[in-house]
Amino acid sequence: MDVFQEGFGDRTDLKELIFGYLKYWYWFALGVFCMIGLAYVYNKYSVPKFEVKSKIQILEEKGASPEMTVFKDLSFFSGKSNDVLDEIEIINSRSNFIQVVRRLGTNVVYTAIGDIKKSEVYKETPIKVNFLAADSLIYQSKFSFFVKLDSKNSFSYRVEESDAPVVFPYGKNIETPIGDIIITPDDRYFNAYQGQLLKISLNPLEKVAQGYKNLVKISNIEEYSKIVNLAMTHPVPQKARDILNELVDVYNQNAVNDKKEIADRTFSFINERINSISSNLSQVDQSAQEFKTSRGLADIGSQANINLNIGAENQQLLENARTQLNMASSMKGIVDGAEDFSQTLPANIGLSDPSVTNATAKYNQLVQERKRLLKSSNEKNPMIVNIDDQLKGIKNSLQSSLNNTVGNLTLQVNNLSTQQSRINSKIYSAPKNERALRDITRKQETTEALYLFLLQRREESQVALASAAPKSRVIDRAHLADDAPVSPNKPKIYLAALVLGVLIPFAFVHLAKVLDNKIHNMASLEKLVKNYPVLAELPKVDKKKKIVLDGDSRSVLSESLRILRTNLDYLVKSGPAEEKNNVVLITSSVSGEGKTFVSSNLAAIFSSTGKKVLLIGADIRNPKIHDFFDGGSKEKAQSLGLSEYLMDEALNENDVIQQATINDYRIDIVYSGKIYPNPSELLMRERIETLLKKVSQEYDYVIVDSAPLMLVTDTLLITPYTNHTLYVTRADVTETKVVDFPIALAKEGKVKGLCFIVNDVKEGNLGYGGKYGYGYGIKTKKWWQFG
């Protein structure tokens, strides 16, 4: 049974909670209406944005270094995903976007100003603005102005939209803070914009490039895939297409330029070596010719062919080692001389050490990236400083590798030289002429072999220069992902507006409920007072009305008063049989909560049943009862009343009781009387007890309208002689913590028969008590209704 009651109570609380919010339905309706309206305006007048996509494939580098092919199968050299991620970073580099802005000239923006919306004019601009200042100044400047196309001969110019326009003919120099400009019309598109106001904005090149960099999204479709997607969202689809296409073109062109630069540097280096070896070869040929001529030799005998062949083979190895040593030493000299990182190093020159080849390629790549960044920045840029640090590290590593290579080759040359000396000692017994001629021949063959080797390398570098390929292949040129704009997303915006339209009023209502510390109706008061009865709640009425009771009235107030009368009558009759238990004290916390209104109407509602009722105005500090009877007559207020009765013992109760008639019903009233300076002392006299005891026997009900309980002590002086205390609270005025005061007095025994009433309740907050009666459903026609 307890569980059932608990669950029922939870459902009741939930229902009350829900209806507590639903009674503010008009705020929710207004919130939804306003938010949907704002969403409609936003969707209608916001500039739509479209998504443009492009797709490319990153191509593998081929033939960069024959020696590195050995390591292709090793995971730490494969770099499957890192290579693609590195290329994505290169594509998304700031320097690339700066080149894109320079090529497209998008740092100058033309905007058509409408009554509500603004739209960018791209490419098909009715005018052309020529800036006469240097590009270095234009690329760093920020400036905007307005132009109205009055006719094909003249236009109106202003810096701010609110400025007075100045008329200029087309082609005339106009002075601006960034230098002179010249505006010329484009007849192809002029007619479509004649009379239109245009805004021309010049923005810093780097800022525009950074903006594009933030807008462009670059990603690979899978971890090890070489397919890269590029996407950009922009109000002008054609502009987004041009930016993506130009970005890919810049990336590929930079890759081709990098390869050509390395090939050119390698070609120059090999040419220098060929010129040097060509001179040595000519000298060797001349020496052979002079030797044979001077000695008269036509042929060489084969007496020591075995030793000579061995010597020739060893000499070949020696010369190859010396060639490698010569190349390594030359390369070392170039590396040692590279101090400012402005030049690339020769690559693929034939050294057998793979670490030198790999380090050279990495060094050249960083030098080229450094050059591109220096075009739009300076050497103090953190990125350039970072590259310089990497170049220093690579240079040190390259120097170390070259030192090791030179040392190894020197050791190899020394070993071969020693071995050659041993072989030569065996040949010394051969004829002197043959040995000398053979030495010349060997030197001639070796020099010629080196010469042919370098010629081959030079041709290879030229082939690499001619066949330099881009790093990527375009799979899909930039295109619209969908004809429909991605922004604004109308369904989502309307849904968000609907949610906000509900949540915002809910938040305010909930906050008001959380911060609310007032009593609103009978239900809220019952939760506070718990064991003390709440007899009724009275609805809010017109302030001009005093006594509103009508014997035939079926209004909400009349029914509420009847409920109050019934409940109070039950309390009166529930007392001891030997006592009448009919003295009711009506009070409140402070003035203005309606205690006199309740007292007067309660007396009237009791008298309507034919009961004998006495209404006593016990608030002798600030009397109000006379306002409710006889039109608020001052004579009644100044007539004999309770104050005179308490002061003059010669007066009896009949001298101060006056009669009033409400709707043919009689009410006996004891007015407060004149206001004296010592009201508390008057109420402390025994005559108040005498009065209340005597009238309680003569009347069916005695209603005492007293002073506010929390302001003065007058009421507590009367409570010992009363049977019931009706404490009046006012909806939306009385604070919840106030009811603790009369409850505490009741527990201390200072107040008898404490019960509560809620006055001035709004119609929307009325509980079951306020809506009782058939008359509640009767409707009156409003002022706008006719017939």
Image (tube, grey):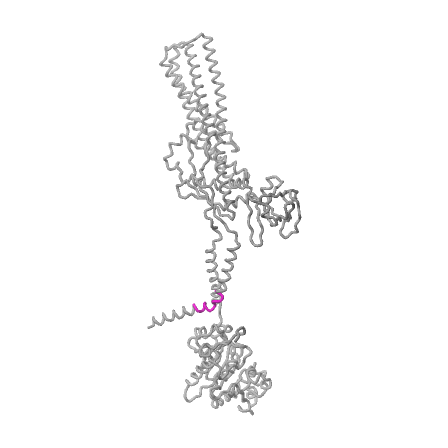
Which residue occupies 34% across, 71% down? 4
The image position of residue 467, as x and y in percent, is 46, 31
Q: Is residue 694 above or below residue 124?
A: below
Nearer the observer, 362 or 11: 11
Does residue 26 show up magenta in the picture? yes
Left/right of residue 557 with respect to residue 157 in the rendered view: left
Residue 516 in sight from this viewpoint: yes
The image position of residue 770, as x and y in percent, is 46, 77
Nearer the observer, 357 or 72: 72
Total numbered circles: 0
The image position of residue 65, as x and y in percent, is 42, 31
Q: Is residue 543 above or below residue 128?
A: below
Q: Is residue 747 above or below residue 644?
A: above
Give the position of the N terminus as an image quadrant: bottom left
Residue reaching furthest to the top: 296
Does residue 13 show up magenta in the picture? no
Residue 742 in sight from this viewpoint: no
Part of the protein shown in magenta: 18-28
Nearer the observer, 447 or 401: 447
The image position of residue 319, as x and y in percent, is 42, 20
Left/right of residue 45 with respect to residue 304 in the rendered view: right
Which residue occupies 40% across, 68% down? 14
Predominant secondary structure, magenta span = helix
